[in-house]
Image: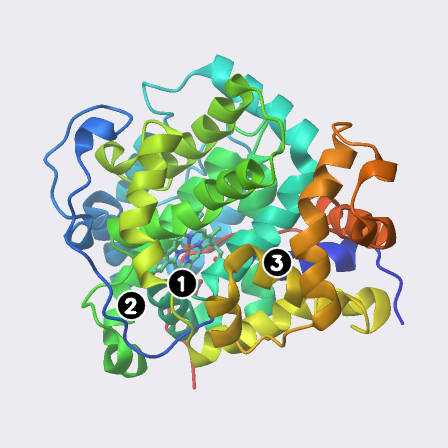
Amino acid sequence: MDRPSRRNVLRAGGVIGAVGALSATSPTSASALWTWSPTGSVVGKGAGVDPRYVWDPEADAVVASVIDRGEVTKVNKLLKTWTKNGQALPKDLPADLRAFMEEARKLPSWTDQGKLATAVDFNEKRGLYLGVTYGFASGMMSTVIPHEARAVYYSKGGADMKDRITKTAKLGYDIGTSNAYKPDGEMIVTCVKTRLAHAGVRHLLPSSRAWTKVADEEIPISQRDMMVTWHSLPTTVMQNLVKWKVPIPAAESEGFLHSWQVCAHMLGIKDEYIPSSWAEANSQAEQVLTPVLKATPEGIKLADLLVNLGSILDGGLLTRPILSSLTRYVLGDEIADSLKLKKDPLWDGVFDQAWEPFIQVREGLLSLEKAPGALQKAYWAFDELLRLGALLFLSEGDLPISIQIPDMNRPY
Ligand code: HEM
C-alpha cells in the first residue's frame, strides 16, 4: 500500500473538495418559484429577477467570442502565466478579454479587509473541522445536485475527472490561505479563471447532444445554479459546525461568510443574489438547495469514489464504513440510501452517539471520562478522520494547476 504522501493525499483531497462533478443524468424537476428578496443581499437591493434566467452576460459574450475566433489554446497558454492576484495580465491576451479581466479582477466595493483578516483566524483555528465538512458535507452534497453534475459530466472536464478534481480543489485551498485576496495570494486569479471556464461551458454545452437530451434548461450554470453550489459550500459547512456545537466567535463566523461573499462576487454572481448574513443564506438555501437534492446514476458512482478515499490508508477496510456512516450522519438516511451507501450497524450508531461529544471533548467542554462509552472506543478513529480532512484542506497547492477555458465538450 502506498504511503499517504502530501501529494497523493492532495490528489485524493481533490476528489473530496471537488466533487461538484459527475453525478447525474436524469432531469430534475425541483425549481421552486424565486421569492428570496434582494433586500437580504450584500447590497440590500436589486431587481429580484429569478436567477434561473440570469447567467453572466459580460463574461459569456467575450468568452464565446474567444472560442469562436479559435483563440482558446493561445489564451489558455497565456493564462497559465498569470498566477498572483497582484500580477499584471499577460500583455498578449486579446484586447476584449483583457479589458473584461481587468474589471473582473477588482474586489467589490463592499469588501471588508478586517472581516477577511478574521476569516484567516477562523480558517487557521478551524482547519481541522473544515477539511471534513468541505469534504463530506459539501463534497457529498454535490453528488446530489443534478444541474451541476450533468454540466460537469458532459463538459470537457467530465472525461478526466482526476484532473478536474485537482483543479477544483485549488479554489478550496486558495480561499483558506492567509493571503487569499492579497496581491501575493491567488484567490482572485482562481475566481476569474473559473468565471471564464464557466462562461466557456455556457457557450459549448448547449451544442452537446448528450447534455441537451437530459438537461431541463437550455443554458447551463445560471445564477441560481451558482447559488445552489455556493450553498453546498459555506452555508452547509457552517450549518454543520453549528449543529456540532463547535464554539465559533460571532466575528469569525462573519469573517468566514465574508470570504465566501467576496468569492461569490468574484465568480460573477450578482450582488443582489449574495446573502448578507447566515440567516439570509439559510433561508435562500432552504429555497434553492434543499428541494433539488436528488441522487442520480453518476452521483452514486461519485459517492462511491468519495467513501473509498481512505483506501490509500487501509485499503478501505475501516475507512469505507467510517466515511459511509459519516455521510449518513451528515446528509441523513434518505440521501445516503439513495446514494446506495450501505448501512453499518457499528459506525452509524457511533456517529449518532459519539460525534458531538467528541467535538465537545476536543474543545475542552467535556472530559473524556464523562463522555459516552461509544466515544471511548471511537476517539482515535474520529481524531484520525479529522487529521485526514485537515491534511487535505491544508495541503499546499504544490501542483502546477491552471484552470482553463474549455474548447470542447466531453469527447466520446
Ligand atoms: C469548472 C468552482 C459552480 C460546472 C470549475 C472550476 C472551479 C469551479 C474551481 C475549474 C476547475 C476545472 O477547470 O476543472 C465552482 C464554484 C462554484 C461553481 C466555487 C459555485 C460557487 C458551478 C455550477 C456548475 C458548474 C453551478 C454547473 C451547474 C462547472 C463545469 C466546469 C467548472 C462544467 C468546467 C469543467 C471543464 O473544464 O470541462 N468550477 N463552480 N460549476 N464548473 Fe464550477
* Residue drawn at x 54%, y 63% as measured from the top left: 164
All told, the count of numbered labels is 3
Which of the labelled discs sits on residue 406, or is there none? 1
- Residue 105 in view (yes/no): no
Q: Is label 1 within 8 A of ligand 1 (CB to nearest ligand atom)?
A: yes
Ligand 1 shows up in which quadrant of the image? bottom left
Q: Quadrant of the C terminus?
A: bottom left
Distance (Cα) linking label 3 and label 1: 23 Å
Q: Residue 136, how many percent across, how many down?
A: 60, 56
Using the image as rendered, state which of residue 407 and residue 26 is in the foreground.
Answer: 26
- On screen, residue 50 versus residue 96, left or right, reads left
Residue visible at 71% across and 72% down in the picture: 345
Numbered disc 2: secondary structure: helix
**Are the two marked residues, 1 and 2, in contact with CB atoms closer than 8 angstroms?**
yes
User: In the displayed structure, would residue 263 be above or below residue 384?
Assistant: above
Q: Residue at x 69, y 72 (%)?
A: 344
CA separation in Å, label 2 and label 3:
27 Å
Q: Give the residue at mark 3.
A: 16
Q: Which residue is mark 2?
A: 204
Q: Looking at the image, which residue sits at the far top? A: 114
